[in-house]
Image (spheres, rainbow, N blue to C red):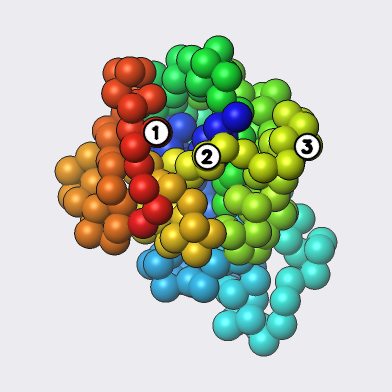
Amino acid sequence: MKLAVFDLDGTLTHTNAVDDECFVHAFLETLQLTDLNRNWNGYEHVTDEGVTRQIFIEQFGRYPAPEETGRIVDRFLDRLIASHAADASKFVEIRGASSLVQRLRDSGWAVALATGAWRRSAEFKIQRAGLQIQDIPAAFAEDGPSREGIVRAAIERAGVLHRQSEFERIISVGDAIWDVKTARNLSLAFLGIASGARAALLRDNGASHVIEDYRDPERCLQYLDEAQIP
């Protein structure tokens, strides 16, 4: 059995922009900060949990207490809810995402979700985007803080669900440089989801195959089989 492990924001949903906006404001408002480093590539672990820990270390010299993280997550979700109420078009799936996931499952593939987002925010975006993936194995920022840890957790849960001690092929699907790096670090094949300059950036960082969206399922299946380890 083959396994496809998908990221969420920018990979299955067009939510990168609204996620960044709400995440930053949740920190500024909860911690009463005046500014925040928004260069996510500058963080050691580009996950909600990893970024939170690094911000606390840099700002306060310590890790956050669970209740502090909880308040940030609460505020983050409030922001997402308000953004959706103001403009639901910010929460849509990448074209063809749900159809491809179903096509893969019908074709005998296993599918899993590995996102750097906190579970509550991820589930909200999945629901509002109308993605039909609620029943697939998933790992979230709580399984981190590293993306490698999150992807490993998703693979392990897929193995348990499908009773597979080892998959014939595992491919990671993502949209960002850190997704390429994670696949490389785990020796996983990688398929990039991006267009324009962002697609060129993925290729420059080692992605052998990049597609814009999932509207052509036959091409997607071909790329999932052909894509190489970055």
**Type of the residue with mark 2:** Arg
**Residue in the foreground of this view, choosing between 127 and 170:** 170
Q: Earlier in the sequence, mark 2 or mark 3?
A: 3
| Picture quadrant of residue 220 | top left
Residue of label 1: 225
Q: Is residue 91 left or right of residue 52?
A: left
Residue 24 in view here:
no
Q: From mark 1 to mark 2, how far is it between C-alphas?
A: 8 Å
Residue of label 3: 160
**Type of the residue with mark 1:** Asp
Question: Percent position (x, y) of residue 20?
Answer: 45, 51
**Residue in the foreground of this view, choosing between 227 and 213:** 227
Please report the residue visible at 60 percent of the width from the left and 51 percent of the height from the top: 151
Do tag 2 and tag 3 residues touch (Cβ < 8 Å)? no
Please report the residue visible at 77 percent of the width from the left and 32 percent of the height from the top: 163
Do tag 1 and tag 2 residues touch (Cβ < 8 Å)? yes
> Tag 3, which secondary structure?
helix
> Local crowd at mark 3 within 10 Å, few (<14), some, or many (≥20)?
few
Q: Quadrant of the N terminus?
A: top right
Q: Nearer the viewer, mark 2 or mark 3?
A: 2
Q: From mark 2 to mark 3, how far is it between C-alphas?
A: 16 Å
| Picture quadrant of residue 191 | top left
Q: Earlier in the sequence, mark 3 or mark 1?
A: 3
Please report the residue visible at 61 percent of the width from the left and 63 percent of the height from the top: 146
**Type of the residue with mark 3:** Val
> Local crowd at mark 1 within 10 Å, few (<14), some, or many (≥20)?
some
**Residue in the foreground of this view, choosing between 29 and 203:** 203
Q: Nearer the viewer, mark 3 or mark 1?
A: 1
